[in-house]
Amino acid sequence: MPDEHYENPKLAAIYDRFCGWSRDRDFYLALAGDPPQHVLDLGCGTGLLCDAYAAQGHTVTGVDPTPAMLAVARQKPRGSAITWVQATAQAYRSEQRFDLIIMTGHAFQVLLSDDDVAATLTTMRRHLAPSGRAVFESRSPAIDWAAQWNGTEERSCQGVTVRETTEVRSRVGDRVTFEQRYQFPDETLVSFSELRFLPRQAIEARLAAAGLRVEAVFGDWASSPFDATSSHEMIFVARPVEG
């Protein structure tokens, strides 16, 4: 089932108001180092990070499967300087090699099958420069995410108050399904999502199988070491295996 959170143009237009600049984006922006670097953002969404990288002088490619998100991304201040590609992370192919490949916003967890995970990590390995890094995050399965997420908040978006309600519906094995309701003055839009919560060891095994070695695993956006019982994030930094 398509996720209206990303597919619906009305929700894409307000995405940055609910999921705007935050500490995780500071973390990813700092990874690029001195320009010019070649940066690939897999699952770039509305292009917030792509635009920020471009502002620093980096050469940026943003890849996303949804036309609604890319339509918003192209309107960013430096949108015309960024290469936008409509494709999944699994299927993206280019002759270019990148110094930094990122997948942010917990997009890794949208990969529900082992085949999709393997194909995405293969994309990263195939497009990394020899000294490049691939960086992405996944939420720790040890955390009670229903307690973290369930609730309601209101935001003012383009002069309109939007009420967002999140409800976790189920947690079975490594899958969590949840519903988000966006109440506009004239209508209510409902988004159904399913995420996969793989443990650290499983992700590291899949990275190794794709020819990527883990350089670091952080537990938060301050680059603290990952703690299996208390860390909310698992932030993986990987490099291509030599040879």
Image (spheres, rainbow, N blue to C red):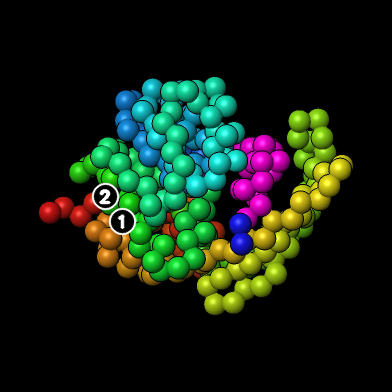
Mark on residue 122? 1
Three-letter code, disc 1 = Thr
User: Between residues 148 and 223, which one lies in front from this camera angle?
Assistant: 148
Left or right of 219 on screen, residue 202: left
**Quadrant of residue 60 within the rendered picture:** top left
Between the C-alphas of marks 1 and 2, the distance is 6 Å
Q: Mark 2, residues whose alpha carbon is within 10 Å: few (<14), some, or many (≥20)?
A: some
Q: Which element carries disc 2, helix, strand or loop? A: helix
Height in image: 163 above or below 118?
Answer: above
Q: What's the magenta region?
A: 3-24
Q: Residue at x 39, y 66 (%)?
A: 115
Contact, mark 1 vs mark 2 (Cβ under 8 Å): yes
In which quadrant of the rendered image does the N terminus lie?
bottom right
| Residue 116 visible in the picture | yes
**Residue occupied by mark 2:** 126
Q: Is residue 50 above or below residue 189?
A: above
x and y, in percent, of residue 75 in the image: 57, 27
Is 4 magenta? The answer is yes
